[in-house]
Image: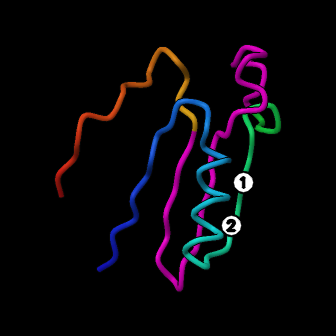
């Protein structure tokens, strides 16, 4: 069994994943902005450069993320597994 976390961010997703890629020695397999997605017209121009989906492979373990649209983003207040 593998667990694949998905992190929702508030506009700094690409910056965070580039950092994770560097410090964890992983490789970003896929990254797509809202503007580059087939659904681009459904989002306002302020979402264009934000990340709709990114996947980072670190020795076979996957980490996923995106920039949540502002109306759906909630500041993290901890987590549990």
- Whether 9 is drawn above or below 21: the answer is above
Q: Within the magenta stretch, is there residue 53?
A: yes
Q: Give residue 69's mark.
A: none
In the image, the segment drawn in magenta is 39-66
- Depth check: 18 or 44 in front? 18
Q: In what quadrant of the picture does the N terminus appear?
A: bottom left
Circles 1 and 2: CB distance less than 8 Å?
yes
Q: Residue at x 18, y 58 (%)?
A: 81
Q: What residue does disc 1 label?
A: 31
The x and y percentages for residue 7 are: 44, 47
Q: Residue at x 67, y 40 (%)?
A: 51
Q: What residue does disc 2 label?
A: 28
- Depth check: 46 or 24 in front? 24
The x and y percentages for residue 80 are: 17, 52
Residue 1 falls left or right of residue 23: left
**Dot 2 alpha-carbon crowd within 10 angstroms: few under 14, some 14 to 19, many 20 or more:** some
What whole-number distance in Å separates the C-alpha atoms at marks 1 and 2?
7 Å
């Amino acid at each position: 069994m593998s667990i694949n976390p998905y992190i929702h961010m508030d506009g700094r997703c690409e910056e965070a994943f580039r950092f994770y890629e560097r410090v964890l020695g992983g490789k970003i397999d896929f990254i797509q902005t809202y503007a580059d997605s087939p659904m681009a017209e459904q989002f306002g121009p302020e979402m264009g450069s934000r990340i709709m989906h990114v996947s980072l492979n670190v020795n076979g373990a996957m980490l996923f993320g995106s920039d949540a649209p502002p109306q759906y983003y909630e500041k993290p207040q901890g987590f549990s597994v």
